[in-house]
Amino acid sequence: MRSGSAIALAAGLALAVLFIASLAAGSVWLTPAQLLHAVGADQNDLAQLILLQLRLPRAVLAVLIGGALGLCGAVLQGLLRNPLAEPGLLGVSSGAALGAVIALYFGLAARFAYAAPLMGLTGALLAMSLTYAFGRGGTLTLILAGAAVSALAGAGVSLALDLAPNASGAYEIMTWLMGSLTDRSWDHVWLAAPFILGGAVLLATTARSLDALSLGEAQAESLGLDLDRLRVAVLIGVALCVGAATAVAGAIGFIGLIAPHLVRPFVAHQPSRTLLPSTLLGAALLLGADLAGRLLRYHGAEIKLGVFTALAGAPFFFWLVLRLRATAP
């Protein structure tokens, strides 16, 4: 078995184990027998209610979001040929966060339950459009445009916090920004899944182009690769995936950075072979983080998912920076 297939199989097995553990773990633990019984139980059964209405949509959403972040990170690192690239680099995450914060700030979320997710998706698409409009000159300009859009959206979020009409409004915004899968339902899954799956399919079609781009932009163009078309496809795919993920779960970092780096040494650093394992590993990492945050409670409250991924991911980021510095010429 080739190493790429082996790492994909290992990530898939880890994902399956964590998925089952996510269904069983919580304030009320369910044994494997109870999980099987709950599937065929009547609607008044408590185990069935916990499994099908609380834990299963949460686990499915974690798989979708984690897989999307892992895939986006792998594609962006291949497109930008930058090992530190991750889904938030092009301003999409910040745009989605700003859109959701606007819905919370003006009370739209209180009047319409899905105002924040829909505004988050709108913000992600607008941020993507702005990044592309200013970053069409090449890879460097794209990164700079993304940084500018991220800064602008971040300033908008900070302004909303500063001008929040009351403490409860600021608390609601801050809670959402910390990222969480708590109390997510099937409605959130149905809202995010079409955008995430559509974006993932679009990103998957870029695999061969990313392999060509790894030779250099001039060489890739000589092979017939349309760089502008590739950048547009990646930007749209990332906007759909990350926008939908951020819109329903808040800001979740580091998954898109860590997953491709753990995979790449096993696939000879070939971009196309990184995509599937990164997707599976990203889903497993987010499921594991959500499970750990659920179990490691502080004063009875769950640790927010975005906070937990940042605490776990920051040491990896520092290690990565030190490793790159040590190997740089």
Image: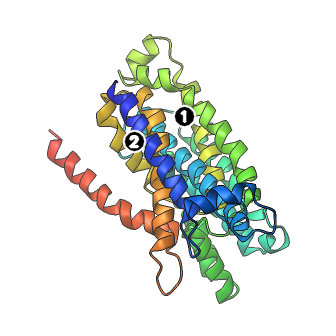
User: How far separated are the C-alphas under marks 2 and 1?
Assistant: 25 Å
Compared to residue 225, the image places residue 328 above or below, namely below
Q: Quadrant of residue 167?
A: bottom right
Question: Whole-percent x and y of residue 29?
Answer: 56, 70
Helix, strand or loop for disc 1: loop
* Quadrant occupied by the C terminus: top left
Report the side of 321 relative to 72 (left or right). left
Query: Residue 260: which disc?
Result: 2
User: Which is nearer the eye, 185 or 153?
Assistant: 185
The residue shown at (38%, 49%) is 258
In the picture of the structure, the residue carrying the numbered disc 1 is 136
Q: Which mark is residue 107?
A: none
**Residue 80 visible somewhere in the drawing:** no
Q: Amino acid at mark 2?
A: Pro
Please report contact status of discs 2 and 1: CB closer than 8 Å, yes or no. no
Q: Nearer the viewer, residue 139 or 263?
A: 263
Q: Nearer the viewer, mark 2 or mark 1?
A: 2
Mark 1 residue type: Arg
Q: In which quadrant of the rendered view does residue 94 lie?
A: bottom right
* Foreground of the two, 300 or 97: 300
Q: Position of residue 153 (x, y in %)?
A: 58, 61
The answer to whether one can see residue 279 in this image is: yes
Label 2 element class = helix
Give the total number of marks visible in the rendering.
2
Instruction: Identify the residue shown where x is 36% and y is 27%.
Output: 270
Q: Position of residue 33 (x, y in %)?
A: 59, 59
